[in-house]
Image: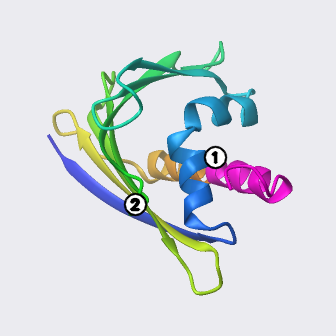
Amino acid sequence: MGVFTFTNEYTSTIPPARLFKALVLDSHNLIPKLMPQAIKSIDIIQGDGGAGTIKRINFIEGGQVSSMKNFVDELNEKTFTDKYTMIDLKGKFESIVYEVKFEATPEGGSKNKMTSIYYTKGDVELKEEDLKAGKERALGMYKVAEAYLLQNPDAYA
């Protein structure tokens, strides 16, 4: 098994509390509404949304996968941190762990950092295009949520 770690950062004009509420605490409601072309629904199949929760993300028909599951390892509403693990994966990964942190900037926005830790099966090597595609999907979701929050200043305030 191989372990590969990657970190991405981006900044936003949206304060960390709003982004955290939208992208973490209420993602199961918001993301399917904002991305209906990709995500059919997100169901909480175990837990109350906090640590120990399992969420199933259901994708639209015709995609590469029909669903995937995330296990919430840690969730801290005070420090705006979230750690979750993609589980029950098929193919080349045992699991993928994501650690997300939203921090305030002096300008009133946020600096957002996501660390991804890929645990591969056997001697699988990650290819640059795999990493690029994953990074683009994550950034795309952030940008869609950010646009929604900018257009709806009272949402998640």
The kind of secondary structure element at disc 1 is: helix
Task: Give the image location of residue 30, x and y in percent.
Answer: 66, 36
Magenta range is 140-157
Q: Position of residue 92 (x, y in %)?
A: 30, 31
Q: What residue is disc 1 on?
A: 141
Say if 24 sits above or below 102 in the image.
Answer: above
Q: Quadrant of the C terminus?
A: bottom right
Q: Residue 72 appears in which quarter of the rendering? A: top left
Amino acid type at circle 1 is Met
Mark 2, residue position:
78
Q: Nearer the viewer, residue 63 or 60?
A: 60
| Residue at 49% from the left image edge and 18% from the top image edge | 67
Bin the neighbour count of mark 1 within 10 Å (Cα to Cα): few under 14, some 14-19, many 20 and up: some
Q: Which residue is located at x 33 percent, y 24 percent?
A: 89
Q: Vertical placement of 98 versus 67: above or below?
A: below
User: How many numbered marks are there?
Assistant: 2
- Relative horizontal placement of residue 111, taking residue 117 as reference (left or right): right
Residue 116 is covered by the magenta coloring: no
> Residue 148, how many percent across, how many down?
78, 50
- Residue at 62% across / 57% down in the picture? 18
The 10 Å Cα crowd at callout 2, few under 14, some 14 to 19, many 20 or more, is few
Q: Nearer the viewer, mark 2 or mark 1?
A: 2
